[in-house]
Image (cartoon, coloured by chain):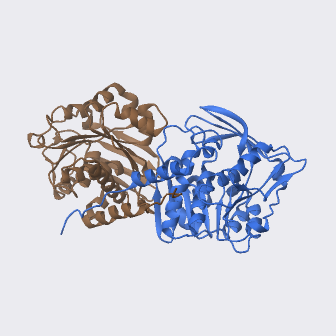
Chain colours: A blue, B brown
């Protein structure tokens, strides 16, 4: 398997100033898989749903060539459901309801076929569940991890233990500050990288993303969107594009990591253009190519001459 | 004159978590001039101080080859004084005291020598005072303007009138949102550019800066600083480096504007390393060259190949 997307497959109910949708296909593993598939084949999902999960949603994933052997369908169980509301500035969201349902007893089991040569992509979940997945994959190509403020506050010890097994952590700027307990992002990045992840990506929403490695810092811009309809899944789409590119080139050099950040940003910028995962179902590879190239154009600094020739 | 820096020359009293200074040399015109001088000669100041302003501070400016013919020294007057405090995250500042003093009756007079071929650089001031300066310069090479939320709220009509005379506006992201009454920065930028300034720079602090022109958007990163001691004057230093570069190359092409944003960012990144303008007095041209080059390196995206060759 190229990419194993571990996380949630869910019902999302979303309100934004531009509309509302009810119980659409959602969840971190969904967005990761639907985004990675533009870059490489062989994408498997490790997640759980209830038997209320509609066949139509399974078909959406299958039609996008996502392997569902790792998707447990729990008999008599109800699928994880989330409801949230975004206000006008779209930066903060309000959670209206979280029904964990089958997630409360989620014991992920990684199919044998998924275990060889995979990039393991840990969507936001309880850190101890994330760890149990990593421990099932004896020789992962790369372990990439997301988390959120909830786990930083509630289960810091479990999170630190999981981070020790992670090659690349992808979090947003407020989470980075909270995790390191340090307001300066550069210092915070150094502290987090000493917890385990040699590669750290700090997402800054409309301000782009920073990539920290042993080679220093790389700064990627955000795409200047005029119409953002629904930010749900943007972070997971970023992660999917990021790991999808790395899986496709089978390379984790600094240049590959930089390109992966740009592809992740490009896919995320499409994802927010429509509600739920809708835009990810219609965007084309050449759309993504063009947008990635526009990231390159908009951040290219012309050559510089010395201020004084002396 | 290459650059005419219009604004305040002031006493600043600053507290940050890293120390405090009392009545140091400050003011927008001071920071603009001390930053522009790395790039071009012939920098004049249009400002007012009281006769309490120490000769030693005048010498600092003169020693940096700043022309002071446009600096009015008001007999019996007291110099504008500002006191502020920064908290740990350094993003928000609290104004502790503002003594306008001689600024209340400031009627700027642009010396004849300053009027030919100048870039007029309007530091943050009452918009009607800014306009009175522009009206004294019959054929400016470029008019570059700063403003702040205070004027957006208190004198919106005067501000709009001034913006009609401005080629390039430099403001921060919250000011841009407030000025356009629009939370989406890309939309806000379009609305502000229709008020007059064909070139708009939106500063985003630790997130870099955006340049909006007829050619689209250019995104410049911020320098990832571990040690910021005093943010005072960062915006004015940016403006000084920006106009200094444009004056030195006598060019306002899109590439010149992009480089100017990078040089502005580079000078600002030094300015915040020490209290007041201290760092601007010790940094060298080759320091600025190296930092500008590092901006270029940290935002360079490697070449991209199409996702599918078909």
Residue A41 location (% of width, % of height): 65, 60
**Extreme-top residue of the structure:** B157
**Image quadrant in which you'd find residue B16:** bottom left
Q: Nearer the viewer, residue A32 or A156?
A: A32
Residue A229 in sight: yes
**Residue B284 image position (x, y, % from top left):** 26, 65
- Left or right: where B200 falls relative to B54: right
Give how far across and how far down residue A185 sits, in percent: 51, 59
Viewer-proximal residue, A100 or A11? A11
Query: Would residue B71 appear left or right of B236 to someone viewing this image?
Result: left
Quick check: can you spot residue B87? no
Left or right: where does residue B97 sit relative to residue B286?
right
On the image, the x and y values in percent for residue B208 come to 42, 52
Which residue reaches farthest right? Answer: A76
In which quadrant is the C terminus of chain A drawn?
bottom left
Q: Quadrant of the N terminus of chain A?
A: bottom right
Please name the residue shown 79% across and 59% down the image: A69
């Amino acid at each position: 398997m190229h990419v194993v997307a571990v996380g949630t497959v869910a019902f999302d109910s979303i309100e934004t100033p531009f509309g509302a949708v009810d119980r659409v296909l959602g969840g971190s593993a969904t967005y990761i898989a639907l985004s990675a598939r533009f870059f490489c084949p062989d994408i498997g999902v490790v997640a759980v749903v209830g038997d209320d999960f509609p066949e139509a949603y399974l078909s959406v994933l299958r039609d996008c060539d996502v392997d569902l052997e790792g998707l447990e369908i729990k008999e008599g169980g109800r699928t994880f459901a989330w409801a949230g509301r975004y206000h006008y500035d779209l930066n903060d969201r309000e959670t209206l309801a979280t029904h964990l349902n089958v997630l409360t007893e989620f014991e992920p089991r990684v199919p044998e076929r998924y275990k060889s040569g995979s990039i393991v992509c840990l969507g936001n979940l309880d850190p101890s569940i994330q760890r149990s997945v990593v421990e099932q994959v004896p020789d992962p190509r790369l372990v990439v991890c997301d988390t959120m403020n909830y786990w930083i506050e509630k289960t810091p010890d479990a999170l630190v233990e999981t981070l020790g097994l992670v090659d690349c952590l992808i979090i947003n700027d407020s989470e980075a500050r909270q995790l390191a307990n340090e307001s300066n992002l550069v210092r915070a990045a150094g502290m987090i990288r000493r917890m385990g992840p040699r590669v750290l990506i700090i997402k800054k929403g409309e301000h782009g993303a920073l990539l920290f490695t042993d080679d220093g810092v790389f700064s990627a811009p955000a795409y200047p969107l005029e119409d953002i309809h629904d930010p749900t899944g943007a972070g997971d789409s970023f992660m999917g594009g990021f790991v999808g590119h790395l899986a496709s080139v089978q390379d984790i050099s600094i240049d590959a990591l930089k390109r992966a950040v740009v592809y992740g940003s490009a896919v995320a910028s499409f994802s927010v253009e429509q509600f739920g995962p809708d835009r990810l179902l219609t965007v084309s590879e050449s759309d993504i190519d063009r947008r990635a190239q526009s990231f390159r154009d908009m951040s290219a600094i012309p050559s510089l001459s010395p201020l004084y020739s002396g």
